[in-house]
Image (spheres, rainbow, N blue to C red):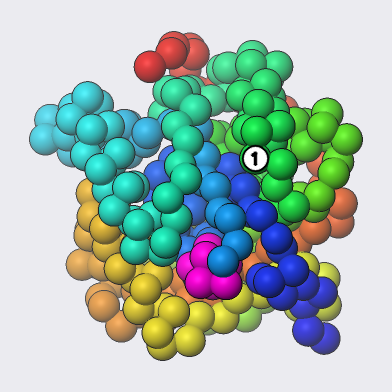
Amino acid sequence: MAPALSVAELGTILGVWAHPDDEAYLSAGLMATARAAGQRVVVASATAGEQGTAAPDRWPPARLERVRRWEAAASLAALGVSEHHWLGFTDGGCAGVPPEVGQAAVGRLIDEVRPDTILTFGPDGMTGHPDHRTVSAWTTAAWRAAGGTGRLLYATLTRRFHADFGALNDRVGLWTADDTPVCADADLAVLVRCDDALLDRKIVALRAQASQTAPLVAEVGEETYHRWWAEEAFAHAARTPQHPPVRPDREYATT
């Protein structure tokens, strides 16, 4: 069964994510397709991802934040996306933000953009990252508070993805929780399979965020990296479980 919606039917799109590069991995092909068709696409990043390194001596938070902001701008430009909002929360600290504060930040964007479609993580947070799960909860609450107008879609994965890349995902430690997302093809709302040209464009967007992607490309190899995220899947929010509480990893502090 084909997914219920084409990218053209999504109208104005607002993507709400935790860190720069989340949107590229999970929706670059979708965003590029929408922009090529003249649709408005707006992206919001809750944090600048300033803690996203295994080498903090080389990449202290202030330096990494600066670099990741530049990388995100280059990445989105490759996809034709010019509207990007930074919500200003601390990387790794979203779960410690009062829920009403996070919800209000997303709610202001919804009021401003008036999207036909909102994209974000499911309650599982895709990888299980607390920031991802928290941003999903904020976005879902803000969407409901706005009357549930438009559609809310959660990023998910197909059974085919798990079959093809399960061993690789385990090897690189992709999952930080047991509730990894999976959706039967019949329940998908949107499925984007990147053809060669679209995948090349997505890889350019990912490579622009080199502080995060270059080590993975080196580890898994060019060919595997190209195939790994060539498919983007989304499910309707109403068909997924509700949000469990998320334990704060650290005290909340503003940037």
- Is residue 250 in view from this perspective? yes
Residue 36 in the magenta stretch? The answer is yes
Secondary structure category for the residue under label 1: helix
Q: Residue furthest left?
A: 58
Q: Relative to the observer, which residue lies in front, 222 or 74? A: 74
The answer to whether residue 152 is above or below residue 18 is below
Where residue 40 appears, x then y in whole percent? 58, 55
Residue for point 51% across, 72% down = 36
**Residue 226 in the image, given as x and y percentages of width and height:** 36, 78
Residue 205 quadrant? bottom left
Residue at image position (21%, 39%) is 67
User: Quick one: 127 or 44, which is closer to the camera?
Assistant: 44
Q: Amino acid at mark 1?
A: Val
Residue under the point 12% across and 30% down? 57
Q: Is residue 45 above or below residue 155?
A: above
27 vs 163, nearest the viewer:
27
> Which quadrant, please, contains the C terminus?
top left
Identify the image quadrant of the N terminus: bottom right
Q: Is residue 37 left or right of residue 85?
A: right
Residue range in magenta is 31-37
Q: Is residue 154 visible?
A: no
Residue 159 within the segment the image draws in magenta: no
In percent of the image, x 40 and y 84: which residue is there?
A: 197
Q: Identify the residue position indicated by label 1 in the image.
A: 113
Of residues 51 and 2, which is closer to you in this image?
Answer: 2
Residue 53: where, in percent of width, then height? 26, 40
The image position of residue 203, as x and y in percent, is 34, 70
Rendered position, 245 above or below 68:
above
Magenta portion: prevailing SS class: helix
